[in-house]
Image (cartoon, rainbow, N blue to C red):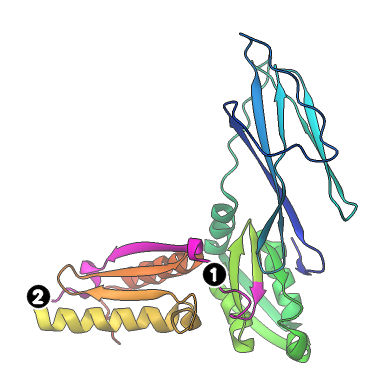
Amino acid sequence: MSVSVLRSAWMIFSIAFSAEQPGPPALKGAPEPLPAVKNQRHFVVQLKLIEVDEQGRETVLGEPRLKTTGGNAGVSIDHPDGRRFEFVMKLSDRLGPGDELAPARPQATDSALKKLDQKIDLNLQQQSRKEVLREIGRRTGLSIAVDPESIRGIVDQMDSAMDLKVSAEPVADVLNRVIEPLNLEFIVKHDVVFIATAEKLLPAPEDFVVKTYSVVDLVKTGDPEKDALELAALTERIRTSVMPASWERKEAAATIRPFNSTLSIVVRQTVPGHAAIERLLDKLRRELPMKISD
C-alpha cells in the first residue's frame, strides 16, 4: 500500500457480541431494535464507531446497539457533520455445504508488526524519501501515513534524492534509516504506520507495556563484577539503538532498568519499541560469542 499524507481521519469500527444489558441512548438514524420476545433466544450486537486522526488519537462517534432473533439486521449512524455510516450484519447458525469458517482476524497492530519484522532487499538510487517510503509500503503491504505538519519545514529534505541499498534488513530498521535523519519517528496503531515528530507521537499511558528480558546468555562471564559491567553496557546499547528519543522525553518517557541479581533488564516501552529490542537481542545472540560492549 502506498504512502499517504493524511488530510482526513481514518474510520474504523469494531463489533462485540454481548448479553442483553442497558446501553447508551439510540443514535439518530439508527433503526429501532427488535422487541425482546419472552423465552426466545435473541442476540444483541454492540457497535463502536471510532474516528482515528493523523496522530492516532481516537474519538468515539457512536455506540449503537441492535437486537435480532437471528435474521439479518442493519444499523446506520448519522453524524452531525453530515456523514452517514451504514453497517449490515448477517447471522448464520450453521455452515452450508462447502462453506468454511473465516479465520479470525489478527489484531491490527500485530499484523503491522509482523510486516515490520520482515526482511527486505532494496536497491534504490536517487529516489526522494517520499518515494522510498512509498516503495517500502508497496513491497510490504504496510499503510504508511506521514503527518503533514511534521514535514512542513523539511519538505525539501523529504523531496531530496537519496540512495538506499539494504539486504535482508528488517523493515522497521529500514524505515528508521529513512526518517531518523529528519528527526522523525513512527508508531503503529490500527495497522497503520504513523510518521511524525516525537512531540506529535507522544504515547498514551495505555500504549506502554512492561517486559522483563533475561540476558544471562549475553552478559554472564562468571565474574559478578564483570557481569554487572556487561549488563550496564547492554542496557546502554538498547538506550542508544532503540528509539533513542523515547527514553529522554520529559513526558511519556520509556524506562529501562538493569537488575544485576538476575542479569535481566526491565523495560517499559511501546509495542513497537519492544519489537525493536527483541530484534536487537536476537541479532546479538546470533553474533555470540562476540562481546556486547565492543
Identify which residue, 278 or 50, lies in the foreground. 50
Which residue is located at x 34 percent, y 73 percent?
284
Q: Give left or right: position of 33 versus 269.
A: right
Locate the N terminus and report the quarter of the image it occupies: bottom right
Q: Is residue 266 visible?
A: yes
Residue at the extreme top of the image, as rendered: 39
**Could you say where residue 282 lies in the image, as x and y percent from the top left?**
37, 66
Q: Assess whether residue 196 is covered by the magenta stretch.
A: yes
- Choose mark 2 or mark 1, whichever is in front: 1
Asked if residue 35 lies left or right of residue 205, the reply is right
247 and 181: which is toward the camera: 247
Disc 2 residue type (three-letter): Gly
- Residue drawn at x 14%, y 71% is 261
Report which residue position mark 1 lands on: 203
Residue named by callout 2: 222
> Depth check: 115 or 78 in front?
78
Measured Cα–Cα span from mark 2 to mark 1: 39 Å
Q: Which residues are magenta?
A: 195-222
Which of the two labelled residues, at mark 2 and mark 1, occupies the earlier sequence position? 1
